[in-house]
Amino acid sequence: MLVMRALGQDESGAVDWLRSDSSTPKGSLSGRQFSATDMLELNDAAYWFYEAALHGRLFALGKYGEARGVIFGGPVGLGWIESADYEAVNSIEKAVLDPMNLHNALVLDLVPELGTGAASIFF
């Protein structure tokens, strides 16, 4: 619901947003301008996504990474890579460094079995 508020959308869409991959224009956080109030909403949402992951909802890590990436300005803002170095890498390497993608990949590091069988369709 916090993300829906930050997006200026009806909070009833929260469950659908959580089920999505956030790549639809309506649900994507990246590339948007957020007010200071919206950023506080996203920060609170990131906290709850992290808490959900700590309590076994590992797929919340991707949403956590997405929110934190927006709040801090991606991998450069998070201090993972220098701006000049980030600009020098290709688009595939940039995608690997995307906070949402990186946190989604972390799920497989934590529970490798999720990358096999029927569960692997999510990756």
Image (tube, grey):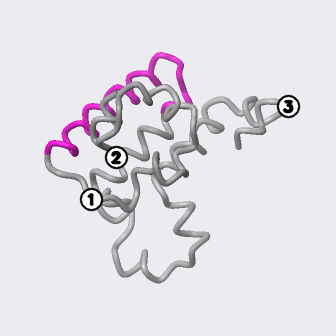
Quarter of the image with the N terminus is top left
The answer to whether 60 appears left or right of 41 in the picture is: right
Residue nearest the viewer, comparing 38 with 97 = 38
Q: Position of residue 52 (x, y in %)?
A: 44, 22
Q: Report the Cα–Cα distance between label 3 and label 2.
A: 30 Å
* Between marks 1 and 3 in the image, the one whose residue lies nearer the viewer: 1
User: For residue 68, which numbered disc appears in the image?
Assistant: 2
Q: Are marks 3 and 2 in contact (CB under 8 Å)?
A: no
**Circle 3 residue:** 117
Nearest to N terminus: mark 1 or mark 3: 1
Kind of residue at disc 3: Gly
Kindly report the distance in space between the C-alpha atoms of the residues bearing marks 1 and 2: 14 Å
Tell me if I can see residue 46 in this picture.
Answer: no
Q: What span is colored magenta in the figure?
A: 37-60
> Is residue 73 shown above or below 37?
below
Dot placed on the residue nearer the N-terminal end, 1 or 2: 1
Q: Which residue is mark 1?
A: 33
Identity of the residue drawn at 57% across and 69% down: 93
Q: Nearer the viewer, residue 91 or 89?
A: 91
Give the residue type that dot 2 points to: Arg
Give the spatial CA distance, label 1 vs label 3.
39 Å
- SS at mark 3 in the image: helix
Q: Residue at x 31, y 60 (%)?
A: 73
Percent of width and height locating residue 122: 71, 39
On screen, residue 69 above or below 86: above
- What's the mark number on residue 71? none
